[in-house]
Amino acid sequence: MKYYLTLFLSVILFASCTKEEEVSCTPQTEEDIIEYINSNELTTTKTDSGLYYIVDNEGTGKIATENSIVDLKYKAYFLDGTDNSESESTTLNLSSLIPGLSEGIQLFKEGGKGTLIIPHELGFGEAGNSSGSIPCGTVLIFEIEILAVYDNYKEQNEAAILQYIEDNNLTATKTESGLYYVINNEGTGAQPTNTSNVTVAYKGSFLNGTVFDESTVSGATFNLNEVIEGWTEGLQLFKEGGDGILLIPYTLGYGEYGYSSIPGYTVLAFDVKLISVN
């Protein structure tokens, strides 16, 4: 996941500059774009909206729509060549992006790659952003590769979990709710119910391996009816002394909006050990 162009695109979507910055701004124009194209001897196509694009490979898979969820590889920079951001894989909702990026991605199918030259009218306009990482009136260039296209986040989560299972050579089981679990050791003691008070040692991470939370070796104690649904269901699969892995889709985790450092629509991976049922 996502996680879900997080740093760069969160700036693109939500930031704006101050009025003082707007007054002093000299926006880049179409003439600047044409000069860039000519000086780099590029062959581009222009859409009715003013977006310029280059198709290196159209792709052969599913094509995105304005409401699709896409896994994208990208590199973003300015007309002067200054790098701004890049990612080997990020998950995006096209309906939430700046117009030029949303439009441009829809020109490709899965496996497709190319370049988008986005005028400021389809990006930040003359606002820029408050941090200054995207100056006011700036043309943005994206080199993109469409890794996958999904109809919704539930479909994307499922694909991400299955890929994680394959990459890590896991043997996992899926429940009716969509939870995936791996039992390394079932345990031999008491088995909790959905209202039990339990002590669990755990480590929570995103599918890219980044750890967002971890207990001490002695574990943390809580009631199973007071945690996310994936934990309530998953920990009932173990007995005292048991351990394994829970792979929790966003529908059983922190939902659309996330929580603290956990973004919305995010798959969570937990290594768990049920120390005791209290």
Image: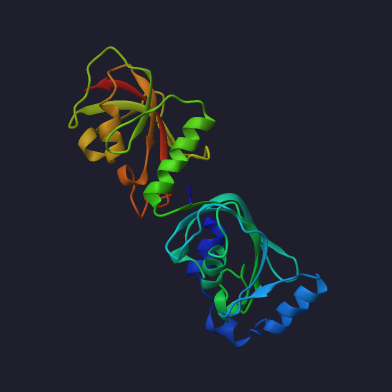
Residue 144 visible here: no
Given residues 18 and 108, the one toward you in this image is 108
The single residue placed furthest to the top in the displayed view is: 188
Q: Give the image quarter of residue 192.
A: top left
Q: Find residue 232 and report its horizontal and vertical position in percent.
A: 25, 34
The single residue placed furthest to the bottom in the displayed view is: 23
Given residues 29 and 146, the one toward you in this image is 146
Which residue is at 52% across, 74% downward?
Answer: 16
Which residue is at 25% across, 13% downward?
Answer: 189
Q: Find residue 236 and report its horizontal and vertical position in percent.
A: 25, 26
Q: Find residue 51 and report its horizontal and vertical position in percent.
A: 61, 75
Q: What is the basis of the colouring in this image?
A: rainbow
Q: Quadrant of the C terminus?
A: top left
Judge from the rendering whether residue 174 lies leftward or rightward of residue 110; answer left or right.
left
Which residue is at 29% across, 28% downward?
Answer: 235
Q: Give the image quarter of residue 272.
A: top left
In the depicted structure, whether residue 186 falls above or below residue 202 = above
**Number of marks in picture:** 0
Residue 189 visible here: yes
Q: Find residue 149 and report its horizontal and vertical position in percent.
A: 49, 53
Given residues 257 and 21, the one toward you in this image is 257
